[in-house]
Image (spheres, grey):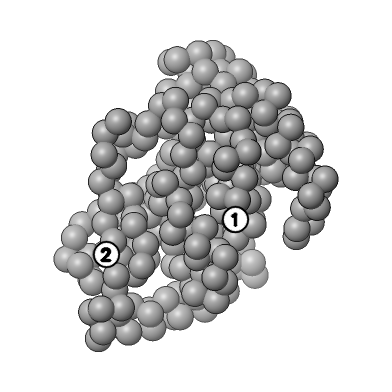
Amino acid sequence: MHKLSKILCLGYEVFTDTLDKVPKGKKIVVNTINQYSYCIAEKDKQFKKSLQESDILLPDGIGIVVAVKWLLGKKIKKIAGADIHEFLLHRLNKDHGSCFYMGASKTTLNKIEARIAKDYPNVKVGSYSPPFKKVFSKEENAIIIKEVNTFKPDVLFVGMTAPKQEKWSVKHKEALNVNGPICAIGAVFDFYAGTVKRPNKTLQNMGLEWFGRLLKEPKRMWRRYIYYGVIFSGYLIKAKLRPSYTA
C-alpha cells in the first residue's frame, strides 16, 4: 500500500496526499479537523485521542491550511468532508461498489438514496437512522453495528455531530465489517440530501466556505467561526512563540 503523506502540526498528523491515494479494500478511519474541532479537542481528551488515532485526518478548514503555512512554512490543500464523499462515490460507481450511511433522519437518508440512484446508478446503498441522542446505549450500538455488518459496505459514511461521530468511528472500528474507509463527514449528509445548501464553488475555492455558511446560518455558526476563530488564533500565536508546542 502507498505510504500516505502527512504533516505533523499542532499535535496532529494531517493528511497532505491526494484523495486517489486513499486505499481500497482496507478498513481505515477517516476524520476531519478544522479550527472548531481543534479547539473542542483541546478541552475533550477523548475527542483529541480519536482525532489523533484516525488513519487519515483531512484538513477540512482554511484555519488548518493557514496554521500549517504559518507555523511550518508548508502549503497544503484544504480537503473537505464533501470532497472525499464525492471522490469515493465516483470510485464506487466505477467499481460497482457499495456504501452505507449511518446517521441523520430517515427523511434525509431517503433523499440521499434517491439522489445516489440518479447520480451513481452502479452504487449499492444502505442506510440506518439511529436514535437522536447524545450517547448511544450498549444495545443501540449493537443494533447499529449489526445493521452495518449485515450490509458489509465498501465504504461507511457516518453523519452525526462532532465530536460524537469521530469518537464513535474510532471506538467501533474493529467491530465494523467494512471493506474500506469509515468516514465521519457530518454536515455532508445534509448537503448531499439538499436539506442544507453548501456555499458555492467560488467561495469554496477562495477559502471562504466558512463565510458562506456563516451568512446562511448566523445564529448557529457565529460561535463556531467567530468565537472559536479567535480562540484558535490564540493557539496559533502560542505555538509560534513556543515552537515545541507546534508538534
At a point 55% along the width and 64% down the height, the residue shown is 47
Instruction: Please state, as top left, top right, bottom left or bottom right, where the C terminus lies in the image.
Output: bottom left
- The quarter of the displayed image where residue 144 is located: top right
Badge number at residue 222: none
In the rendered image, the vertical position of residue 60 relative to residue 240, given as above or below: above
Q: For the residue labelled by badge 2, is the local secondary structure a helix, a strand or a loop? A: helix
At a point 75% along the width and 45% down the height, the residue shown is 141
Instruction: Please state, as top left, top right, bottom left or bottom right, where the N terminus lies in the image.
Output: top left
Residue bearing mark 2? 68
Position of residue 151 measured from the top left corner of the image (x, y, whole percent): 67, 23
At a point 44% along the width and 30% down the height, the residue shown is 26
Position of residue 198 measured from the top left corner of the image (x, y, whole percent): 53, 47
How far apart are labels 2 and 1 at the CA level?
A: 24 Å
Query: Tag 1: residue type?
Result: Lys
Tag 1: Cα neighbours inside 10 Å, few (<14), some, or many (≥20)?
Answer: many
Describe residue 75's horizontal placement relative to residue 192 as left or right.
left
The numbered mark, 2 or 1, whose residue comes first in the sequence reads 2
Q: Is residue 200 among the parts visible in the rendering?
A: no
Q: Is residue 168 among the parts visible in the rendering?
A: yes
At a point 76% along the width and 40% down the height, the residue shown is 142
Position of residue 17 measured from the top left corner of the image (x, y, whole percent): 27, 43
Describe residue 109's horizontal placement relative to residue 238 as left or right.
right
Residue bearing mark 1? 167
Q: Nearer the viewer, mark 2 or mark 1?
A: 1
The front one of 109 and 198 is: 109
Position of residue 220 measured from the top left corner of the image (x, y, whole percent): 64, 66
